[in-house]
């Protein structure tokens, strides 16, 4: 194998965010841009020689070209073997599963998750370590530091493209490239965790489901498992073909973006169960007939019912949720007598808790749910968990949720996103809010809401002692209502302010209010205290979920 050593100059800003490096496709297409980042990654992995790497992506525009580049660079940088998904496809949770099952050194995932794709859309790259989880900050910061001083990269020269459509082993020089079925290992893992017989019986008895893969990578997984292994009727999975531009849609499973699915799930003829997943298949949305389950409730309900499912029959060691996720899971943990950990936003913060056996289930308000079976959130896993519960209880989605509220109380919840704020304005808003914090505790905001605690969330990892500060401003009211403010870490244009609103209602006779009504006073208080309208120059949030 001939290796080209190519001179290059650092690109500014190759700092991985909440979940990898995300930029416009046009940025990734600039000569050397991807190569620089990949070389920076390889350079900080000195023990990579002879190791096995996993590579795959969500199929968005530029996926195939990037896979070929990475394969050539892996060969030139001494890797022994790469496992790559057929067609260059692997979902994020599948990469995690493959790394763990085959004890690989790490994996590269090409995805910008739920961000739109296509030539005008976004592209992304993230690195996962040997436990199958996202690289911790110590590694992403090292990549960033290296990217700032890089002067050359190494890439195999004069080699033909790998045939990504044919399963089996090919070579680039000494390095083996094995094209694998992207679904097989993942499906086998799901079979270990869930009661496939019960779910098959649910479909056989006429249970009806609609899974919207949003033209992203979950399609092949959902088709193979739901329609293949579980016998769901053909057509249960819609938008099941991964498209480079996701069909022009925004592959984000929430009521604002999955409008087609929401429409299908309304009315007496609607299926019993609806679900959707995002670009790289790690997010999930759960729906019943005329009923939307919030991600925070979903986590709590899965936790409360975990022992009904084979993989969790022995109970849970603990639960973990991100700070802005509602406290519904805390109520379940308290009842089960297990800890509920509160971490900063970002799945990577769950890694240590999972590795140390301190948490079994994890979840985030941003439509992420998962467990210790992999080290990523896992969209289809959550859907199968729900399906397993529907199958073994014989109940509907809304009956399960209402019973849960009746037992634990309801945590009304909503997130208001203010997208596309100029970065300076958003920063000014947060700075002003932080400056106010010392004066807020004790303030009476009207409508019986008194601020008990106001702070900027900081987290000390109980396993490795690492500290993360400035993770979001929290206003906690007497009685447990909360308003949380933070800036998104995943956008690629301007800033997005996220306002998370939560109100606890123990009284079952008051569990049927529309969420925005139940939260109206908190919405008013959030705007008053953070002066959102004046800082942003906007009259209303752009997305409400
Ligand atoms: C990604 C991460 C999640 C995180 C989310 C937050 O999806 O994988 O773990 O919750 O980003 O995004 P935000 O835009 O709120 O920073
Ligand atoms: Zn995702």
Image (cartoon, rainbow, N blue to C red):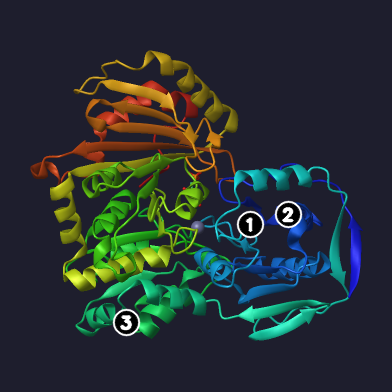
Q: CA distance from mark 1 to mark 3?
A: 35 Å
**Which residue is located at x 71 percent, y 45 percent?**
142
Q: Is residue 343 left or right of residue 297?
A: right
2 or 1: tag closer to the N-terminus: 2
Label 2 neighbour load within 10 Å: few <14, some 14-19, many 20+? many
Q: Position of residue 482 (x, y in %)?
A: 31, 32
Q: Is residue 269 visible?
A: no
In this rendering, does residue 101 appear at all? yes
Q: Is residue 180 above or below residue 273?
A: below
| Earlier residue among tags 1 and 3 | 1
- Note whether ligand 2 is within 8 Å of mark 3: no
Helix, strand or loop at label 3? It is loop
Mark 3 and mark 2 lie on one chain; the one further toward the N terminus is: 2
Which residue lies at the image location 39% right of the left edge and 75% below the top edge? 192
The mark closer to the camera, 3 or 2, is 2
Question: For mark 2, what is the residue?
Answer: 41
Q: Are marks 2 and 1 in contact (CB under 8 Å)?
A: yes
The residue at the far top in this view is 439
Check disc 3 and report the residue beneath it: 232
Q: Quadrant of residue 515?
A: top left
Q: In the rendered image, which residue does mark 1 sit on?
A: 127
Residue 272 in the figure: left or right of residue 277: left
| Dot in front, 1 or 3 | 1
Q: Residue at x 67, y 57 (%)?
A: 25
């Amino acid at each position: 194998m001939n290796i080209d050593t190519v001179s290059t100059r650092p690109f500014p800003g190759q700092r991985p965010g909440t979940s990898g490096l995300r930029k416009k496709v046009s940025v990734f297409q600039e000569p050397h841009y991807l190569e620089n980042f990949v070389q920076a990654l390889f350079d900080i992995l000195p023990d990579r020689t002879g190791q096995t790497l996993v590579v795959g992506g969500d199929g968005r525009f530029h996926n195939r070209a990037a896979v070929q580049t990475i394969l050539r660079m892996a060969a030139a940088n001494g890797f022994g073997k790469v496992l790559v998904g057929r067609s260059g496809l692997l979902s994020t949770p599948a990469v995690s599963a493959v790394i763990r099952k085959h004890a690989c050194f790490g994996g590269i995932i090409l995805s910008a998750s739920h961000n739109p794709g296509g030539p005008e859309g976004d592209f992304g790259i993230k690195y996962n370590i040997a436990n199958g989880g996202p690289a911790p900050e110590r590694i992403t910061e090292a990549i960033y530091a290296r990217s700032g001083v890089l002067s050359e990269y190494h890439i195999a020269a004069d080699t033909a493209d790998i045939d990504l459509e044919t399963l089996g082993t090919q070579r680039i020089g000494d390095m083996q490239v094995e094209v694998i079925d992207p679904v097989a290992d993942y499906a086998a893992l799901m079979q270990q965790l869930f009661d496939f017989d019960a779910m098959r019986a649910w479909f056989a008895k006429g249970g009806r489901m609609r899974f919207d893969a949003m033209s992203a990578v979950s399609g092949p997984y959902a088709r193979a498992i739901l329609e293949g292994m579980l016998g769901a009727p053909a057509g249960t999975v819609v938008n099941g073909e991964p498209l480079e531009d996701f069909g022009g849609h925004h592959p984000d499973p929430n009521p604002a973006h999955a409008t087609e699915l929401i429409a299908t799930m309304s009315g007496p003829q609607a299926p019993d169960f609806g679900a959707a997943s995002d670009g790289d298949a790690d997010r999930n949305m759960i729906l019943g007939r005329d009923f939307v389950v919030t991600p925070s409730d979903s986590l709590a309900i899965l936790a409360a019912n975990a022992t009904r499912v084979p993989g969790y029959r022995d109970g849970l060691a603990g639960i973990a949720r991100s700070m802005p996720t509602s406290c519904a899971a805390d109520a379940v943990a308290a009842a089960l007598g297990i800890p509920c950990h509160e971490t900063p936003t970002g799945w990577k913060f769950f890694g240590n808790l999972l590795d140390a056996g301190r948490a079994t289930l994890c979840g985030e308000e941003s439509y992420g749910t998962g467990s210790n079976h992999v080290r990523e959130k896992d969209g289809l896993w959550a859907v199968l968990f729900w399906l397993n519960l529907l199958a073994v209880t014989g109940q509907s989605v809304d009956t399960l949720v209402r019973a849960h509220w009746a037992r634990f109380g309801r945590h009304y919840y909503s997130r208001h996103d203010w997208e596309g704020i100029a970065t300076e304005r958003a920063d000014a808003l947060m700075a002003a809010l932080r400056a106010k914090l010392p004066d807020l505790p004790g303030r009476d905001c009207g409508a019986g809401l008194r601020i008990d605690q106001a702070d900027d969330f900081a987290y000390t990892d109980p396993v490795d002692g690492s500290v993360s500060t400035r993770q979001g401003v929290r206003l906690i009211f007497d009685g447990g209502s909360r308003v949380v403010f933070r800036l998104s870490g995943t956008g690629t244009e301007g800033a997005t302010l996220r306002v998370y609103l939560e109100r606890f209602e123990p009284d079952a006779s008051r569990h049927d209010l529309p969420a925005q009504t139940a939260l109206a006073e908190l919405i008013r208080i959030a705007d008053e205290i953070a002066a959102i309208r004046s800082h942003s120059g906007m009259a209303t949030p752009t997305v409400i979920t």
